[in-house]
Image (spheres, rainbow, N blue to C red):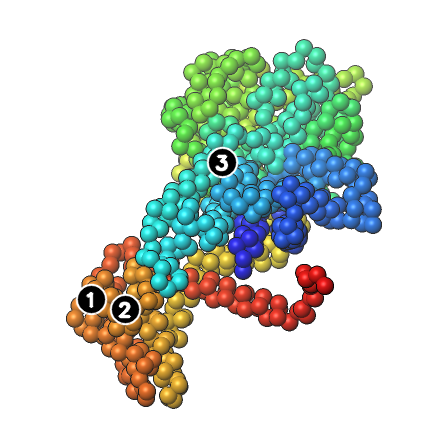
Amino acid sequence: MSGRARLTLCAGAATLMASCALLPLVAEPTWLLELVPLVAVQSGVGAAARRVPLGRPLTMGAQALVTVMLLTLVFARQQAVIGLVPGPDSLRHLADLLQQGSEDVSKYAIPAPLTDGIRLMLIGGVLLVGLLVDTLAVTFRSAAPAGLPLLALYSVAAGLSDGAADWLWFLVAAAGYLMLLLAEGRDRLAQWGRVFGGAPRSPGSPEPSAATPVRTGRRIGAVALGVALVVPLALPAMQGGLLDAAGAGVGAGNRHGGTISAVNPLVSLRDSLNTDDDRQVLSLRTSASDTSDLYLRIVSLDDFDGTTWKPARRHIVAVPHLFPTPVGLAPDVKRSTVRTTITAADWYAQDWLPMPYPPSGVKVSGRWRYEPVGMTLVGDHGQNTRGETYQVTSLEVQPTAEQLASAPRPPAALRREYTKVPSALPKVVARTAKEVTAGATSHYEEAVRLQDYFAVNGGFQYDTRVQVGRGPGAIANFLKKKQGFCVHFSFAMAAMARTLGIPARVAVGFAPGTPQADGTIAVNQRDAHAWPELYFQGVGWTRFEPTPTRGTTPSYTQSDAPGGSSLPDEVLPPKNEASASSAPVSPGNGCTPRLRKLMVCDSPSAAAAPSSDNGGPGPWWYALAGLVALTLLGVPLSPLLWRVRIRSLRLGAHARTEEGARAHTLAVWQELTDSAWDHGIPQDESLTPRKAAARIVRLGRLDPAAGAAAHRVADAVEQVLYAPRPRPAAGAAADVRRVTGALRGAVSTRTRLRAVLLPRSAVRVLWAASDRWSSLRGRVAAARPARRRPSQQEG
């Protein structure tokens, strides 16, 4: 294979390997299977243009034109001329798909569904990177700068994804880049050094003196890989939808429209609460007897990183006809059904659907999806609340103080996820929580004391314009200043509850609105609110209200004793009893078959278990993941496996004929010289077997027994090569094993490991493949009919 053909193949392979880093961003990997033939066609056009040959600008233009035609064929076939040639309609359709893709990216969680827009962004982006890589590495014969677009591709993927397998995709991308450098190194030895650092192939060549180029190549590779590791860490944090850990469909909104964003409530809530134009957001008509407790929940923030709270990544499914019973709600807890009709203002465009919690059903038009863990609805493909009217059936859960105080221990999976506190959280947060709740006999009493500390007796003041700073010290600063608004109070109480071992999260939505004369309830911008939700087994996620002068204090947290907040001692069991009781609610108690199907029952906790989703990983994903895993294992181990097999063939049994003995002796000698090469003794094909054996003995510092074994093998080879009637040599394979063992014992550990894991003699595979390709080309050329050329002689 020629140098350019090898570079073209490696450039395409490196692009595909780097694009694997994008796999975690979407739920289906089928786009990668579509991408492979497109990259192959793009690379093939470049190879054909260079072979003509066309100039570099024309080659780049031809590849760019074919890339546009490929995208037209895949994404705009109906609008194109004869299904392939791009025209105004097809280009307009591609632009619309890109716009749709940008909107999908802004609202879907990772892994996002593979919409047409996201698919175009993935495939088109990788093809663009592939064009740049092919142009730099092959057209301009400069493989090192071709790592920059590969680095950009990997860095974008790493900046958006924080999965545990990011290192795996980094190794795949790095392997592709190094493969590209090694391919170029076959043709530019002076700059990059030899493949595997091996000896010269042709006989008579001088001893390899490529140590300096090899070291240079290693340094360049190390710098490139180091940059690839550092760049994702330096990328700015991205917020919103697919670019954030927010769950699917979080609306970024805008300040002019007044949209309340569940992704960044600290900013959006402050803007809504401080607005001079307190416009109406929602209008409600409800069957609830007490509207003072009718909170409208948009989204729950359950991922705490020490700085802020944000929604965890969750799968979304089709909206069920009836919602499952809330996780943890036992049948003996009093509840009533409430029906609420909600109308959103024409200017209010929220991607999440505000609803009373917990909802048990919703009637809404448009494209909406259901997130089972948070029991929320999110818009699909640009769907939002603007001007929507919908009906929500919800439960008004009325637990008693005794039920909350005697709540058993939550399931381990739920407790593990919702009590996580980052190490960056200042210690004053946990210390203050322990001081405030000192003497409490149950988690419920601790929760009530935390609520009263903020809302009643802690000296805190409600202020929407206060600045408490940013970063891990924000909560500690708030506890010191004792001024803030609902975001600060809810964030602080939820964090302190987690330090006490109480599962906690933060809800964002609207506090109860203002009743109107016509029987409706008006919810305005300044009703935007955040509150903590704490989990109690048997009751489920329970609202608390730590913000003074805002919302309503839940009845189950109010004390009958004047001036006190603690409940009577007779309803508060000892804390150790509540902790010791760990029996979860049985599946029959509030866990319907639909709930079990969605994997949100109490054991394991729905909050910790992924939800089932039709758009989730399927057979293609597992097949591709298995293929990638086999590739990752096979590629690094292939030199080792090849050497193991070839060694067993050379030193194994042979035919008991004169020709078989001759072939076996030559194979044994080949194994001896290859083993010496693997251990750092380059071959010199200009030497006779006897001199070559003496050289191996000298450079390998072999002991007398191993040296004698090496000379016996050399004598056997000379017999085969030069004697009129060669005598078969017995024990040649054992002699080679003895020499190999002596070589292994005389070298350093590093050389020994390299001889096993990355043997220099494995380069023979590439040589053999190159020879076979040349032979094939020769046979094809010989089979072509000779073309007659016009005579250059003048008659």
Q: Secondary structure at mark 2?
A: helix
From the image, tell me which residue sits under label 1.
Answer: 702
From the image, tell me which residue sits under label 2.
Answer: 692
Residue lying at the far top of the rendered structure: 276
Q: Return the x and y of residue 96 as percentages of the image width and height.
A: 76, 36
**Is the Cβ of the residue at disc 1 closer than 8 Å to that at disc 2?**
no
* Left or right: 280, with 42 as reference point: right
Q: CA distance from mark 3 to mark 1?
A: 50 Å
- In the displayed structure, 442 sits above or below 165; it is above
User: Could you say which is closer to the camera, residue 475 or residue 83?
Assistant: 83
From the image, tell me which residue sits under label 3.
Answer: 232
* Crowd rating for badge 2 (residues with CA inside 10 Å; few <14, some 14–19, many 20+): some
Amino acid under disc 1: Leu
User: Could you say which is closer to the camera, residue 178 or residue 447?
Assistant: 178
**Is the Cβ of the residue at disc 3 closer than 8 Å to that at disc 1?**
no
**Is the Cβ of the residue at disc 2 closer than 8 Å to that at disc 3?**
no
Q: Residue at x 51, y 40 (%)?
A: 145
Q: Secondary structure at mark 1?
A: loop
Q: Quadrant of residue 424?
A: top left
* Left or right: 478, with 299 as reference point: left
- In the displayed structure, 661 sits above or below 765; it is below
* Left or right: 145, with 118 as reference point: left
- In the displayed structure, 12 sits above or below 531; it is below
In terms of sequence position, does the residue under pointer 2 or pointer 3 come before the other?
3
Q: Residue at x 70, y 47 (%)?
A: 66
Q: Residue at x 33, y 52 (%)?
A: 209
Which is in the foreground here, disc 1 or disc 2?
Answer: 2
